[in-house]
Image (cartoon, helix red, strand yellow):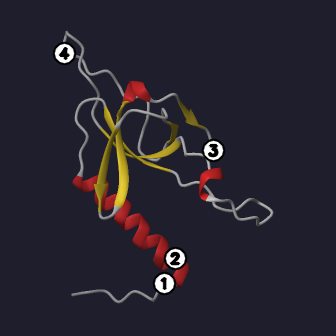
Amino acid sequence: HSIAHPPLPRVARARACQATKMSGIAKRFVPLMDRVLVQKLKTEAKTASGILLPENAKAAPNWAKVLAVGPGRRTKEGDIVPMAVKVGDTVVVPEYGGTALKFDNEEYHVYRDEDFMGIIEE
């Protein structure tokens, strides 16, 4: 039996679709060892005062949202080294490096845990 849910407002529906898409990729791609799946955050095309920026004026984003985290790497003794980041963290990624992946016309990146330069506290 299916349960009827009240219709969602348009904005909530769009957010639910985006969350489903992101959680879908996180469920389909499982990072191994100390690897982390992230999606870079998009830069705004408009300033706070509403001025549209040309494509070349927008700085490349170096912040990313963590979508999936591997279990961690193992030491020579076999112990697991805990990961420094967790799902949902906003991290600073290096300008170069990582491996680009494309799922459902969205671009994602895989980095090693040690590649991140920091976590953005919100």
Tags 1 and 2 in contact by the CB under 8 Å rule?
yes
Q: Amino acid at mark 4?
A: Gly
Tags 2 and 4 in contact by the CB under 8 Å rule?
no
- At which x and y percent is residue 76? 20, 10
Q: Amino acid at mark 3?
A: Glu
The answer to which of marks 4 and 3 sits earlier in the sequence is: 4
Disc 3 to disc 2, C-alpha distance:
22 Å
- In the picture, measured across the screen, residue 47 lies left or right of residue 11, that is right
Tags 3 and 2 in contact by the CB under 8 Å rule?
no
The answer to which of marks 1 and 4 sits earlier in the sequence is: 1
Disc 4 to disc 3, C-alpha distance:
35 Å
Q: Residue at x 81, y 63 (%)?
A: 49
- In the picture, measured across the screen, residue 76 lies left or right of residue 111, that is left
Q: Crowding at label 3, few (<14), some or many (≥20) Cα neighbours within 10 Å?
A: few
Residue that mark 3 sits on: 122
Disc 2 to disc 4, C-alpha distance:
45 Å
Q: Crowding at label 2, few (<14), some or many (≥20) Cα neighbours within 10 Å?
A: few
SS at circle 3 = loop
- In the picture, measured across the screen, residue 75 lies left or right of residue 60, that is left
SS at circle 2 = helix
Disc 1 to disc 4, C-alpha distance:
49 Å
